[in-house]
Amino acid sequence: MRSGRLVSATAGAAVLALGLAACGGSGDTGDTSDGSTGGEDMAGGDVEVFTWWAAGSEKAGLDALVGVFEEQHPDFTFVNGAVAGGAGSAAKDLLQSRLQAGDPPDTFQAHAGAELQDYIDAAQIEDVSALYDEFGLTDAFPPDLVDRLTTEDGAIYSVPSNIHRANVVWANPTVLEDAGLDPAAEYADLDAWYEALDAVQESGATALSIATTWTQVHLLETVLLSTLGPEAYTGLWDGSTDWEGPEVTAALEHFERLMGYTNGDRDGLDWPDATQQVIDGDAGFNVMGDWAEAAFQEAGSMAPDDYVYFPVPGTDGEFDFLADSFTMPVGAPNPDGTRAWLDTAGSTEGQEAFNKAKGSIPARTDADTSDFSEYQQTAVEAFASDTIVSSLAHGAATPVATLNAISDATSKFTTGASDLATFQSELAAATM
Ligand code: BGC
């Protein structure tokens, strides 16, 4: 069962923040039909690729990309530098220590947007715009994504491998039916959703599964988006929306209420555990980015058609965006290897294999997604027509330092160490 409600009826909706639009691309794929430059490597050796795709469906996505890398660049040896912890919760700190110690990997995963700017400002990554010309990437990505990756002086510091959507609710229809709910029901806003959450809670299942702090920040961003709407949500990151205002208070009240439906063991879990609770029928709903799609597809315990997804209530027609991208660190030990990895990550074949397994959609507009899952088809359509906003928890909206301060304030609030007013003023201080 699928809701198919992820695609907004409002085609051609206004695009915020990224200005991303449906785009056919020129189809310039470089020197070969798969968009890679082919196996013309003059050098070889190890290529350490640093990600947080260490296990489960995320590792399966990475493995798919590695498979293409090994075909396209057989002279190089992939070395897995993955550090476990969803959303880079452990990887980013470790990476920063390595970069500061002059011990960079050959390439690392970084989110397009404000997070990437951190590495640029610290002079930790190289301009790879010459590779865009060499690999024919400039026309392969949506122009506004390339604009977002391009600095004022025309430099580009990473190659995007995918586009993920953050504002998705995943649900188990059996749990919903057992609670007397129609699994195909639509919830126009958070107020409408509470009734269903109450019903699931009364049935004895966890109403809304969640995990450690970063997943709580992820929920928070979707609640801010739902309550404020895309313009005022975007204003939170450019200073035009007042964090101390009553609209934010209302959003935080929603957040507090939603947290009341979640599992008590949340702080010891990571996202796969929370999503698994829905897959296993222990929870009704889970708010998670569409890497959860890969977990549902991989689980096997549920028929592939037997789960429900829909935009977080109140965010229909909005696409809470993030993109993983790969970098060329300053001082990378094997720059030819980095170049080879970036070639594969940006290639048509690499993006098709990786994204099909990862739950995301290709950043390339010329990739063939016809054999992607039904959910992914909705994401392709939504990305082309919805209003695009930037994810907070996944590096698109704010620098890492701001996200860290927001995460600390969120954790204090959800563990009972601060009240709502303190939470709100700490959020305001975090974003100043
Ligand atoms: C990344 C995704 C990843 C998710 C959970 C996000 O920040 O962009 O690729 O699957 O975190 O770890």
Image (spheres, rainbow, N blue to C red):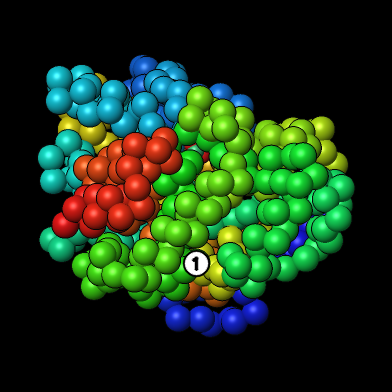
Residue 322 x/y as whole percent: 43, 53
Q: Amino acid at mark 1?
A: Ser
Residue 19 x/y as whole percent: 38, 73
In which quadrant is the N terminus drawn? bottom right
Q: Looking at the picture, does residue 170 appear above or below residue 139?
A: above
The residue sitting at 76% across, 53% down in the picture is: 199
Residue closest to the eye, 51 or 299? 299
Residue 155 x/y as whole percent: 19, 55
Q: Looking at the picture, does residue 142 appear above or below residue 75?
A: below
Residue closest to the eye, 152 or 255? 255
The residue sitting at 41% across, 35% down in the picture is: 415
Q: Is residue 196 left or right of residue 63?
A: right
Residue closest to the eye, 322 or 149? 322
Is any part of residue 61 visible from this angle? Answer: no
At numbered mark 1, what does the secondary structure look like: helix, strand or loop?
Answer: helix
Q: Is residue 298 left or right of residue 426?
A: right
Q: Looking at the picture, does residue 389 appear above or below residue 345?
A: below
Residue where numbered disc 1 is placed: 226
